Image: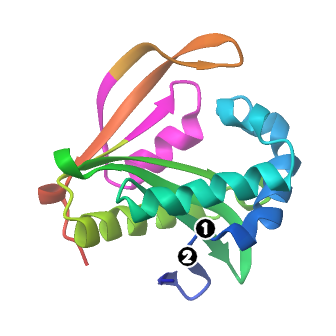
Amino acid sequence: MYSLKVDKNLELALTLPTYAEAIYEIVNRNRDEFKKWFPWVEQNLNSDDTKEFLQECLQGLAKGKLLHNTIIYKGKIVGIVDARLKPEHKKGDVGYWLDKEYWGKGIMSKSVKAFINFCFREYNLEKLTIHCDIDNCSSCNVAKRAGMKQEALLRKHFRVNGEQRDFYRYCICKDEIETK
């Protein structure tokens, strides 16, 4: 298991099934907010659902297709940042969420930036993207603060709560940043 120190209070750690209860509690506490943006929230009904998903994430990691990290702030699990990897195309899609209690502290922006650097350095990727609902300004701002550029407007791209939603696609290429 690895841990990536972001700053003195913040680290990213490989998500393990033993974190299922804590992660489920965050999702459940933030359910009303999260379901605005994430269709998976409706399928996450208990900690067993979360544990099953996290076991699938480890299988995805073993296949080189998924990297799922827990955001730990001052020793407490507060969110997730992950990437669906497409190594054959040297690219990946980044996703993230954070407990509302921790919004506005720069935690997500720092985490995503560190995660992007890690993905480029450790997985030899050339491009990373983030897809954000056009009405999710906070998520769009995280992508921008991570150095990503808006690449496209994807009309009716993703179905959330029974509605086809428009999304922005943000992108950053490895040669646009210095990986540390």
The residue positioned 71% from the left and 28% from the top of the image is 36
Q: As displayed, is residue 63 above or below residue 7?
A: above
The residue positioned 78% from the left and 32% from the top of the image is 42
Q: What x and y, as percent, mark residue 84? A: 41, 48
Cα distance between the residues tagged 1 and 2 = 5 Å
- The part of the chain drawn in magenta is 130-152
Q: As displayed, is residue 98 above or below residue 141?
A: below
Residue that badge 2 annotates: 13
Q: Residue furthest left?
A: 175
Say whether residue 83 is left or right of residue 101: left
Label 1 neighbour load within 10 Å: few <14, some 14-19, many 20+? many
Between 38 and 123, the residue placed more toward the observer is 123
Say whether residue 84 is left or right of residue 122: right
Q: As displayed, is residue 153 above or below residue 175?
A: above
Q: Which mark is residue 102?
A: none
Residue that badge 1 annotates: 70
Reply yes or no: does residue 147 show up in magenta: yes
Q: Quadrant of the C terminus?
A: bottom left
Q: What x and y, as percent, mark residue 175? A: 11, 58
Q: What x and y, as percent, mark residue 40? A: 68, 35
Label 1–label 2 contact, CB within 8 A: yes
Task: Name the element at disc 2.
Answer: strand
Reply yes or no: does residue 143 show up in magenta: yes
Label 2 neighbour load within 10 Å: few <14, some 14-19, many 20+? some
Amino acid bearing label 2: Ala
Q: What x and y, as percent, mark residue 74? A: 70, 82
Q: Is residue 106 visible?
A: no
Residue 104, by quadrant, is: bottom right
Task: Name the element at disc 1.
Answer: strand
Amino acid bearing label 1: Thr
Q: Is residue 23 visible?
A: yes
Residue 11, by quadrant, is: bottom right
